[in-house]
Image: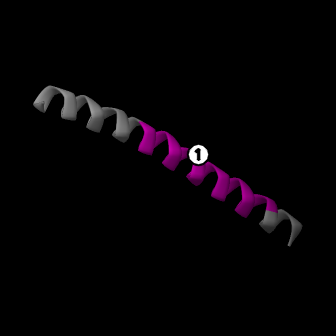
Amino acid sequence: MIICSGELLGVQNKVLKIVGLMAFNGINFAYNNLSIIA
């Protein structure tokens, strides 16, 4: 049980990191484009 939950947490952390990076890059990209237009 401990090993399984640990593996699940590891997968969740990887997914959260990827989603966080994608969201961060998307916000930076949008902000840069808006600042160029403005």
- Residue plotted at (43% across, 45% down): 16
Residue found farthest to the right = 37
Q: Which residue is mark 1?
A: 22
The residue type indicated by label 1 comes to: Met
Q: Is 26 left, or right, of 2 in this rendering?
A: right
User: In the figure, 11 relative to 20: above or below?
Assistant: above
Crowd around label 1: few <14 · some 14–19 · many ≥20 (10 Å): few
Q: Which residues are magenta?
A: 15-33
Residue 14, given in percent of the width and then of the height, sits at 40, 36
User: In the figure, 28 relative to 18: above or below?
Assistant: below
Q: Is 7 left, or right, of 16 in this rendering?
A: left
The colouring scheme, among rainbow, by chain, secondary structure or one colour, is: one colour
Residue 23, given in percent of the width and then of the height, sits at 58, 52
Q: Is 9 left, or right, of 30 in this rendering?
A: left
* Residue 6 quadrant: top left
Judge by depth and name the residue closer to the eye, 2 or 25: 2
Task: Give the quarter of the figure containing the N terminus.
Answer: top left
- Residue plotted at (27% across, 38% down): 9
* Residue 27 quadrant: bottom right
Judge by depth and name the residue closer to the eye, 10 or 27: 10
Q: Is residue 20 magenta?
A: yes
- Residue plotted at (52% across, 45% down): 19
User: In the figure, 18 relative to 23: above or below?
Assistant: above
Q: Secondary structure at mark 1?
A: helix
Secondary structure mostly taken by the magenta-highlighted segment of the chain: helix
